[in-house]
């Protein structure tokens, strides 16, 4: 009976790392690509780790009791992770999401019993908008526990404790480049810090959206790489506190079209139905793999979630 897990929290993490051989052949690459399938976490994304880390730390600090309300501003995946962990631990949840968040994510949150408040996407274009919205959330929910995915140190710490060591273990330390994207920056900061401590010459690379792939006041409905944020040339105070700006050795800009096409290529070449943030990481990894100096190297990248969460954005006639 020792292999029977005792609930949700025991099955978070230890996701597979897969050699993407067909993708390598499709792009005619001379470097090895390894994809970490984070959508195989129990609630469907890498944010299950973040949620568990934040809630477990709050419990250890005595800040939560049964039936408490948890609140946050989220683009979907962290909210889903928090909602799932909360359901398994006896808490309630309420999330604020921009009104352009995919219906797929919103419907998943509702299945977990979460209360949803939609924020007008155009409000996010105003200076210091995120900080003002967070303050509003706290004012409107004075008795709730604000999980603070953008500022809570438990976010990058859980990736330092789990994601980084798993990558190191599963590659036997033979990892030369680590590629990810930034939502809150917890994954790249925490896992990247662990990897750099163990292999100082490893390169940490971030894929970010191009300026033309971001919504703007002039084009608020411009298709974005959902959950992936720009980390260069942005207003001071916009970056999450959980993102270590010193961690990345390189930042590669990716268009929404490139990210979506790459995600579809992964599905049709490897059979893994990944989301657009995964596609952005693939574009960056392919860029790196094509460089002569990376011949024969091992590049590991994160597949944060499943493409099922973006079907309403992809549409039925998407082309690779």
Image: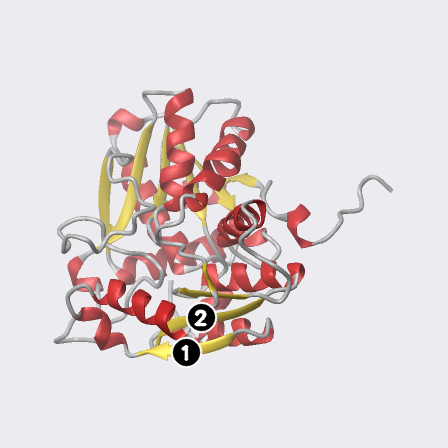
Q: Which mark is residue 146?
A: none
Location of the N terminus by quadrant is top right
Disc 2: CA contacts within 10 A as few (<14), some (14-19) or many (>=20): many
Location of the C terminus by quadrant is bottom left
Residue at x 21% of width, y 76% of height: 220
Residue at x 51% of width, y 55% of height: 45
Q: Is residue 315 visible?
A: no
Residue 20 image point, x, y percent: 48, 41
Left or right placement of residue 141 versus residue 126 in this view = right
Q: Are marks 1 and 2 in contact (CB under 8 Å)?
A: yes
Residue 94 image point, x, y percent: 48, 71
Left or right placement of residue 158 versus residue 231 in this view = right
Left or right placement of residue 137 versus residue 271 in this view = left
The image quarter containing residue 178 is: top left
Report how far apart the C-alphas of labels 1 and 2 lie in the structure. Answer: 6 Å
Q: Is residue 57 visible?
A: yes
The image quarter containing residue 91 is: bottom right
Q: Which residue is mark 1?
A: 117
Residue 105 image point, x, y percent: 47, 70
User: In front here: 242 or 2?
Assistant: 242
Residue 231 image point, x, y percent: 22, 49
Q: Which residue is mark 2?
A: 95
Residue at x 46% of width, y 61% of height: 77
């Amino acid at each position: 009976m020792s292999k029977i897990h005792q609930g949700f929290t025991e099955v978070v993490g230890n996701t597979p790392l897969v050699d993407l051989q067909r993708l390598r052949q499709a792009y005619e690459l001379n470097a090895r690509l390894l994809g970490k399938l984070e959508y195989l976490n129990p609630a469907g994304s890498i944010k299950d780790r973040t949620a568990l880390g934040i809630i477990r730390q709050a419990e250890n600090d005595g800040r939560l009791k049964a039936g408490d309300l948890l609140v946050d501003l989220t683009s979907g995946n962290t909210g889903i992770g928090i909602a799932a962990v909360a359901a398994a631990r006896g808490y309630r949840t309420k999330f604020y999401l921009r009104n352009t968040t995919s219906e797929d994510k919103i419907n998943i949150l509702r299945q977990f019993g979460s209360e949803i408040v939609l924020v007008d996407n155009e409000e996010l274009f105003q200076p210091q908008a995120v900080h003002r919205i967070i303050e509003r959330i706290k004012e409107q929910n004075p008795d709730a526990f604000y999980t603070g995915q953008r500022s809570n140190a438990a976010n990058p710490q859980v990736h330092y404790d789990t994601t980084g060591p798993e990558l190191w273990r599963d590659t036997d330390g033979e990892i030369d480049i680590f590629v990810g994207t930034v939502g809150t920056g917890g994954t790249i900061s925490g896992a990247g810090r662990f990897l750099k401590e163990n292999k100082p010459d490893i390169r940490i690379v971030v894929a970010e959206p191009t300026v033309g792939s971001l919504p703007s006041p002039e084009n608020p409905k411009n298709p974005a790489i959902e959950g992936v944020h720009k980390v260069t040339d942005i207003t001071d105070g916009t970056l999450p506190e959980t993102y270590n700006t010193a961690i990345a050795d390189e930042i590669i800009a990716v268009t929404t079209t490139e990210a979506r096409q790459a995600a579809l290529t992964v599905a049709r070449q490897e059979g893994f139905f990944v989301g657009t943030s995964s596609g952005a990481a693939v574009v960056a990894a392919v860029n790196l793999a094509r460089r002569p100096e990376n011949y024969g190297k091992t590049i590991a990248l994160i597949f944060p979630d499943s493409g099922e969460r973006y079907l309403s954005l992809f549409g039925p006639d998407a082309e690779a």
